[in-house]
Amino acid sequence: MIPAMSLAGVCVFICGILAMWPVWGFLTPIYMIIIFFGATFSMIFLPSGNLGNLLFWVGFIAASYISHTLPHDPVW
């Protein structure tokens, strides 16, 4: 399972860089690393147990909803 998840993580990171390259250009890898570490280390602020699970999913769904409703111009 560890090799499969490692490969999936590398693929997601590379695809994220390719997707954001038109937006940020050469700074994309740096920004993606900062976003990755920020998202990873923000998990320590969640409480353990069912409340932490609930808060994680509420935050995940809220971030997904907000990211699709923000007004923006398409890149293409």
Image (spheres, rainbow, N blue to C red):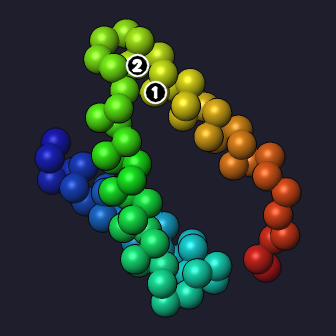
Q: Amino acid at mark 1?
A: Phe
Q: Quadrant of the C terminus?
A: bottom right
Q: Is residue 4 visible?
A: yes
Location of residue 38 in the rendering, given as x and y in whole percent from the top left corner? 39, 53
Specify the quadrant of the image occupied by residue 47. Answer: top left
Q: State the residue position of label 2.
A: 53
Q: Amino acid at mark 2?
A: Asn
Location of residue 29 in the rendering, given as x and y in whole percent from the top left corner? 41, 78
Relative to 55, say whether 44 is above or below: below
Q: Nearer the viewer, residue 20 or 58?
A: 58
Q: Residue furthest front?
A: 45
Q: In 3D space, how far apart are the residues under numbered discs 1 and 2 (Cα atoms)? A: 5 Å
- Residue sitting at x 15%, y 53%: 3
Relative to 65, say whether 40 is above or below: below
Q: Residue furthest left?
A: 2
- Residue sitting at x 37%, y 10%: 50
Q: Is residue 15 visible?
A: no
- Residue sitting at x 35%, y 32%: 45
Q: State the residue position of label 1.
A: 56
Taking 49 as reference, is 21 left or right? Answer: right
Pointers 1 and 2 in contact (C-beta within 8 Å): yes
Location of residue 53 in the rendering, given as x and y in whole percent from the top left corner? 40, 19
Q: Using a 10 Å C-alpha cutoff, classify the residue at mark 2 as few (fewer than 14 neighbours), some (14 to 19) or many (20 or more).
A: few
State the count of labels: 2
